[in-house]
Amino acid sequence: MINVAVFGVSGRMGHCLVRAIRESGDFTLTGALASPTSAAIGRDAGEIAQTGPVAVEITADRSRALAGAAVAIDFTLPEATGDNLAAAAARHVPIIIGTTGLDAARHALIRRASEKLPVLVAPNMSLAVNLLFDLVGSAAAALPAEYDIEILDAHHRHKVDAPSGTALRMGEIAAGARDSTLAAVGVYGRFGKSVSRPPGAIGFSSVRAGDIVGEHHVIFSGAGETLEFVHRATDRMTYAHGALTAARWIIGQPPGLYGMADVLGL
Ligand SMILES: NC(=O)c1ccc[n+]([C@@H]2O[C@H](COP(=O)([O-])OP(=O)(O)OC[C@H]3O[C@@H](n4cnc5c(N)ncnc54)[C@H](OP(=O)(O)O)[C@@H]3O)[C@@H](O)[C@H]2O)c1
C-alpha cells in the first residue's frame, strides 16, 4: 500500500481525494492537513469527506500530516504552497500540486524545491485534458494559419476567473505551435460593432452557469470545414483519479519538476 498525505483535505477536492483513496485499493490515507482556523481540525478525515471513518485525524501540523507518507497531494490555496513545499522538502516526500492560481514567485519556489525533490504541478489533473493539450499543439502546428482558432470554456456559476486556466493553457500551446505567443494573438470576448477577427487571432469565450463542472471546446475552422475538440468533466472525481495516477508515477522518480505530460509519456 502507498501511504499518502492530503493537504486541503477539508475542501471540495480533498473530499474527492479521500473517497478516491478509499476506493483505490493501493493507497492508504496516513495524513490530512487543513488550515489552522479550519472547523475540521481534530476530526476524522473520512467523516469530513462522508466516506465513513478512516482513523486519520485532520491536523494543521504539516510535519505530523507527512509522517510516514510516501507522497503528498496538495489541493489548497496559493498562500499555502510555500509552507507545503518546505514541509515536503524537509521530509523528502514527493509532492503533487493541484492548486491553481500560482504566481511567478510561487512557481520560482516550486522550481527551487524541485532541485532536491520530485515535484509535479498540474493545474488540471484530468488525464484526457492533458492529452488534449498535446492534440491541440499538433493540430495548431499541422493546420495552416488560415484555420482560425477559437477556445470556449464553460464552468459553474461560482468560478471567479475567466477564461479558465485550462483554456489559457490551450491557447498558449496553440500560439506556441504557430511560433507566436498568447500575449500577441489572444482576443478575449467580443461585443459591439467593430469586432471583426484579426488574422491569426486566438479567440476566447466563457460561459458561467449552474453547476457545470468544466467543459472546453477548441475549434479550428478553415474554408469549408471545422475541426472541434471537446472535453467535458462531469465529476470532480476525475481530478482526484488523475492526482492518484500522478502520485503512483512520481514515487521513485529523481528530483525534478514534472507535469502530467510526463505521467502520460507524451
Ligand atoms: N489541478 C486540478 O485538476 C484542480 C481541480 C480542481 C480544483 N483545483 C484547485 O485546487 C485548489 C483547491 O480547490 P477546492 O475546490 O478543493 O477548494 P476549497 O474547497 O476551498 O478547499 C481548499 C482547502 O485548502 C485548505 N487550506 C486553505 N488554506 C490553507 C492553509 N494555509 N494551510 C493548509 N490548508 C489550507 C482548506 O482548509 P479549510 O478551509 O478547512 O481551512 C481546504 O481544505 C484550488 O486552487 C482549485 O482551483 C485544481
Image: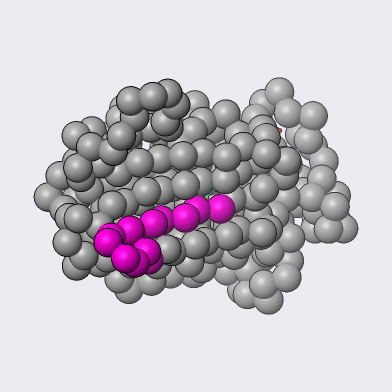
For residue 116, side relative to residue 94 (left or right): left
Q: Is residue 160 magenta?
A: no
Above or below, 107 against 9 in this view is: above
Residue at the image position 38 percent from the left and 71 percent from the top: 264
Q: Is residue 222 magenta?
A: yes
Image coordinates of residue 63 in percent, x first then y, are 55, 41
- Quarter of the image where one finds residue 158: top right
Q: Which span is picked out in magenta?
A: 215-227
Front residue of this view, candidates 184 and 21 = 184
Colouring chosen for the image of the structure: one colour
Above or below, 251 against 49 in this view is: below
- Quarter of the image where one finds residue 240: bottom right
Residue at the image position 47 percent from the left and 55 percent from the top: 217
Image coordinates of residue 173 in percent, x first then y, are 27, 52
For residue 46, side relative to residue 65 (left or right): right
For residue 39, side relative to residue 159 (left or right): right
Image coordinates of residue 19 in percent, x first then y, are 74, 60
Residue at the image position 51 percent from the left and 39 percent from the top: 206
Front residue of this view, candidates 7 and 69 = 7
Task: Dividing the image into four quarters, tell me where ligand 1 lies.
Answer: top right
In which quadrant of the rendered image does the C terminus lie?
A: bottom left
Kindly report the secondary structure that dominates the magenta region of the rendered protein.
strand
- Residue 116 visible, this orientation: no
Above or below, 229 against 16 in this view is: below
Image coordinates of residue 239 in percent, x first then y, are 58, 57
